[in-house]
Amino acid sequence: MQALHELTDGALLDRLQRGAFAYFAENTNTRNGLVADTSRAGSPCSIAVVGFALSCYPVAVQRNWMSRPEAAALTLKTLEFFWHSAQGDRPDVTGFKGFYYHFLDMQSGRRVWQCELSVVDTTLLMAGILTAACYFDGVGDEQRIRDLSDALYRRVDWQWARNGRETVSQGWKPECGFLHYGWEGYNEATIVYVLGISSPTHPLPAASFAGWTDTYQWENLLGHDVLYSGPLFTHLFSHAWIDYRGVQDGFMRERGSDYFENTRSTIAVHREYCARNPRGYEGYDGDLWGITAGDGPGDREMRQDHRDRRFFGYMSRGAPYGPDDGTIAPWAMLSTVPFDAEAALRGTRHLLQTYPQVCSNDRFSSGFNPTLRAQEGGWLSEGCYGLDQGLLVMMIENYRTGLIWEITRNCPVIRAGLTDAGFTGGWL
Amino acid sequence: MSATVPPPKGDPATQDDFLRRVRPPEWRNPQPRQPYDLVIVGAGPAGLSAAEFARRQGRSVALIERCWLGGNSLNSGSIPSRAIIRAAQALSFLRDEEDYGSMAFKRPATDFSAVMARMRRIRTRLAEYHSADRLRNQGIDLYFCDARFAGPDVLLAGDTPLRFKKAIIATGARPKPSDIPGLDRIGYLTSDSIFDLTELPRRLGVIGGGPLGCELAQAFCRLGSRVTILQNDPRFLPEVERDAAELLSMSMSRDGVETRLNTSVVGARMDGGDKCLDTVNDDVKCSIAVDEVMLSIGRVRNVENLGLDAANIDFDPARGLDVDEFLRTTNPDVYAAGDVCDWHHFTNVAESSARMAVQNAFGAMIERPDQSKIPWCTYCDPEIAHIGIDVREASRQSIPIKSFTVMMQDVDRAITDGQDDGFVKIYVRDGTDQILGATVVATHASELINEISVIMSAGIGMRRLATILHTYPAQSDAIRLAAVAYLNNQNATSAGR
């Protein structure tokens, strides 16, 4: 078989998109639609990964990887599971107030690891549910998908998630109540406000979005104007669903930018940072970047080339402020393809040519560190993560056909949420 | 407020010199003149500054101090803390020596008593500049005793009534005491007592993650203690700019400081010989065993037992003294300066506000503290310094701002010096070149911020700053490079139009 980096753009994208999608076939419990967080044995379900999976099924139908009835049936099964799953304030159920626990048992669908009821992850699940409702516009199973989608969305009590404050809390546990993460500044949560504000039942006040953007910082960094957030994924998660081209909120209107352009600028900052490579990490280059949240080599310190090196496990990495331990996410460059195709494809080819081990069976690992154990080809994360694969399928599709963005541009919830949050212009 | 004064620690010679300067054992309080132009309560940075400034203007001045001259800054604040931080920094540098090609000092050991002795020598040396003898020679009547108001124009220095035309309260603040059940019983250190340690604690628990707590946590960690910071807030240094706090958090973690955020200490007890702190983080309960606990949860203002009611001065035990914009209390002849009425708790602010209080007391009411140009620094490594507006304040005031950032890792001199952690971030009013503030994270941020302070005071904008020559290579070139980034950005925007 031809090496990946030697394929044409179209063939390369096809192979990698299909390879990423195959994650869902291999890691989904078809009885309830739950998808494993990672491909590692015993992994629980992550509700965010389910949200990505639900958004990828329409892609699979369009590309003939699944039949439409097959995709609709699996989607319906997933929605039925969530609709009928146990809700309440007991510690062993599936959700509460319409939100869901971050991690669920793949079989029973109940909370595992004493994890938190997650606002952001529920939002990503809801984004998938709403995408499915917009795509499946037929009768029978497809009608039922739309009905359940509406019911699930209406059940989410966004108001409760504010805990009496202006902006939303990020989580809650029955053992101790609301969690305090102390988020500040731009991150992946724009879509939380978009979906929350347009709820017909328990909406967030429109002003809550402005409350959140008050902590934004407009910055000229490494020669580029950006709304900074360190990890790349924060510039991609809301964007996987929402076509931000030309639509601007108050903050972006004042700066003459939008969240699409901001992701482009962020890519430029990351490339520049890796080209300068201030910490001298192996491999970093203007065509080898991808610093984001993800798996890492684990907490360890070592002396290497007369300097101290420190590595981390799963964590949110960022550039240029860090933290940065020389770990990149091999999937990250390609997932920026709708924003800067040339950079994404050049980088991905360079990565595949230099370190082909980061992609096996056409599927990228979650994390790769060429600095640690450089003689042995670097450290490579075990298995794959569902979030990475889902994001990749969606972003490649947005680049190739714009399918997800086209679907959600017609989603009344997303249109209303953006409008009420103060977005104007472009396709709105 | 008892006049019992603890003896200073340290070797006898240094101790004698120190006492001779800050509270001579043989001191006799002077015979009062009546009335004084100005009586000042408290001889910390604010009180000393006010006294010397008023004397230079020819006023008769009485200064009352119940403990040692110099206040927190000299005795339990900036100076001892900086001295220990410097020692810890030096040790840390020696441990990195291999990076610089030297193999001589592999893993140097810490002599804690030498570190503390150096700190005391420095304190003694600095005490000379405002010693009791010098103050007396300047014509200041110095009283070592408690002070309380006996009426609107009279203070008691001990039992001696001192009539005044004007008075300044400069009693400062002290570490906030514990409300953690059991902590009083097992004993804890504060910034008032940690500098009296004679042995390095093997394990140190720091409750509260404020600037002083972080500074000492990092220093003690570098000296060899195993340090854990326990902090209620989910954000590290919540008052500090987000990226600065994040960077320092990483740096402290690299040093080995363990920081537990969003963690409340709910109880303290002895377990064997260990001091045990019981903590709760959301739903996770934990215990941590340490040898010493340092409490650093803020400061309370010294307003008790001053007889403020007798002088018609309004105060609140929590908020401190109520002063107007000219630093005047509700008694029109009594002013306040320094930590007792200011939340900053910075020596530079205390000194500056003291001079303003004197100006306002004896002249036209014209001097107001300018909150927009106060530079401050947290002396961790790297240091975090700030001046003027920040993103949160700009947002509160609806001022559109834009930051121009230069990473120290892109500054030639920072690279050659191996001090390339950090950044210079200058906040500009969007659409103009007016500098509204800056955050600097760098090994010498406390020095770099002063250049920005001068620039802001002189009203220099980014355009002109870009053309001002700096030495090369110099770390302060980062400031010029931020202005160059501004120019480049302007040019790119114009070209794009």
Image: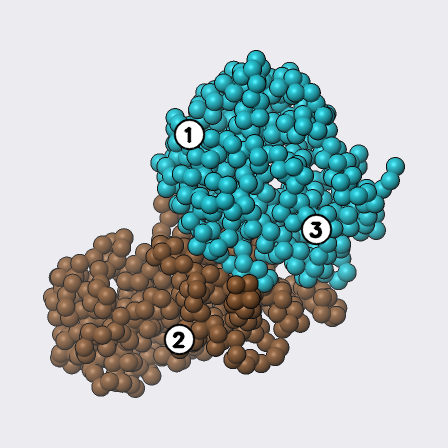
Chain colours: A cyan, B brown
Q: Label 1: state its secondary structure.
A: loop
Left or right of residue A264, residue A412 in this image: left
Q: Are marks 3 and 1 in contact (CB under 8 Å)?
A: no
Q: Chain of mark 2?
A: B
Q: Amino acid at mark 2?
A: Gly
Residue type, label 3: Glu
Question: Along the horizontal axis of the image, is B73 left or right of B474?
Answer: left
Residue B142 tag number: none
State the residue at coordinates (39%, 45%): A211
> Where residue B288 sits in the image (x, y, percent)?
53, 42
> A145 or B213: which is nearer to us?
A145
| Residue B161 image offset from top left, x and y in percent | 14, 72
Q: Is residue B238 left or right of residue B330?
A: right
The residues tagged by marks 2 and 3 sit, at their Cα atoms, a distance apart of 44 Å
**Are the residues tagged 2 and 3 within 8 Å (C-beta)?**
no
Q: Chain for mark 1?
A: A
Q: Residue at x 29, y 83 (%)?
A: B136
What amino acid type should be assigned to the residue bearing mark 1? Answer: Ser
**Any mark on residue B459, and which?**
2
Report, in whole angstroms, how far the alpha carbon at label 3 lies from the one at label 1.
38 Å
Of the pair B288 and A330, the residue shown nearer to us:
A330
Q: Give the quarter of the figure containing the N terminus of chain A.
A: top right
Q: Quick check: A244 above or below B26?
A: above
Helix, strand or loop status at disc 3: helix
